[in-house]
Amino acid sequence: MVPSRLMSAKQKILCIIGPTASGKSARGVEEALARGGEVLSVDSRQVYRGLDIGTEKITPEEMLGVPHHLIDIRDAREAYSAGDFVTDATRLIQVVVARGRLPILVGGTHFYFDALLHGLPARIDANPALREELEKLSADELYARVVERDPRRAAALDPQNRRRLIRALEIIASLGSVPQRRVPTPSPGTRVNLVNYAVEWMVVDLPREELHARIDARLTHAVARGLVEEVERIREQVGDERLNELGLEYKIVGEYLRGERTKESLLPTLSAKLWQYARRQKAWLRKLHDELRLVVERGPDVWLE
């Protein structure tokens, strides 16, 4: 499909999104080569050095010479927030544009896309006393509280991301719910201007069975490449509490390293958890499509125009 001409004074960017294991990184390289672009990673974990196999980080060989940004910019012990991403991405978009190139944002961290394009949530100061209380709860208990008090926000969160669950509960305690940032609704067939950007969305969304098979193949390959050994190295650097914050792969393999699960349970558990995560990502994509009311052409991919 040939995209329609964009009639806007705002800066054009291409956003490529999709569930885990859907092939977003390869599509980003393909589009960058075709359009003269550079890739900005929109991934909350690929910013960390050493988290390579577990995050399926694109390799230099796979980049095919296309410049990639926001990969390997933090130590795994350091925090990296949506606010940090917005600051970094805004600056880099300007740098890429100044070189006469197209900024191509590629990733699956939808909260980062939301923060960049719609603005950060309302500023609510930290509540140390509440945080101290919430830190004593498990991720499952935290998620259950968010589900009870703000089901809409819960649907957008990773149930195992303690930091974001605690932050959501802080905001809920202050405001009653996490404010929803609204997206302008254009007429069908038009593009959408958000903040300072004219956004073209490209969604890589595979059929359910194919995506499930790709997740399983990716996990088998990751274990063969040394996923367990990578998690062991990261665990030595950051400790178990931080390891659990670095995503499903690191949390579940960490449980194996601590003797809390068998090696035989690794792949089945990871497969089930990653499929649940992919389903949440697909739900976000459906919400995006509903909000934008854009024309959808279904094929191996979905183009939103």
Image: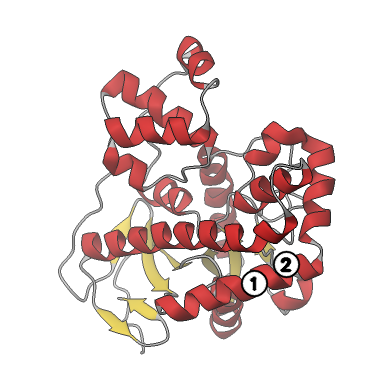
- Count residues near mark 1 (Cα–Cα under 10 Å), then give few for <14, some for 14-19, many for 20+: some
Q: Is residue 280 above or below residue 74?
A: below
**Disc number placed over residue 218 in the picture, else none:** 1
What's the residue at 59%, 57% (across, down)?
Answer: 269
Percent across and percent down for residue 130 are 45, 14
**On the image, numbered disc 2 is attached to which residue?**
222
Q: Quadrant of residue 246?
A: top right
The secondary element bearing badge 1 is classed as helix
Q: Is residue 127 above or below residue 281?
A: above
Q: Is residue 203 above or below residue 236?
A: below
Cβ–Cβ below 8 Å for labels 2 and 1? yes
- Count residues near mark 2 (Cα–Cα under 10 Å), then give few for <14, some for 14-19, many for 20+: some
What's the residue at 51%, 38% (across, down)?
Answer: 83
Q: How is the image coloured?
A: secondary structure
Which residue type carries mark 2? Ala
The secondary element bearing badge 2 is classed as helix
Percent across and percent down for residue 82 are 51, 41
Seen from the viewer's position, the closer of residues 1 and 57 is 57
Seen from the viewer's position, the closer of residues 59 and 193 is 59
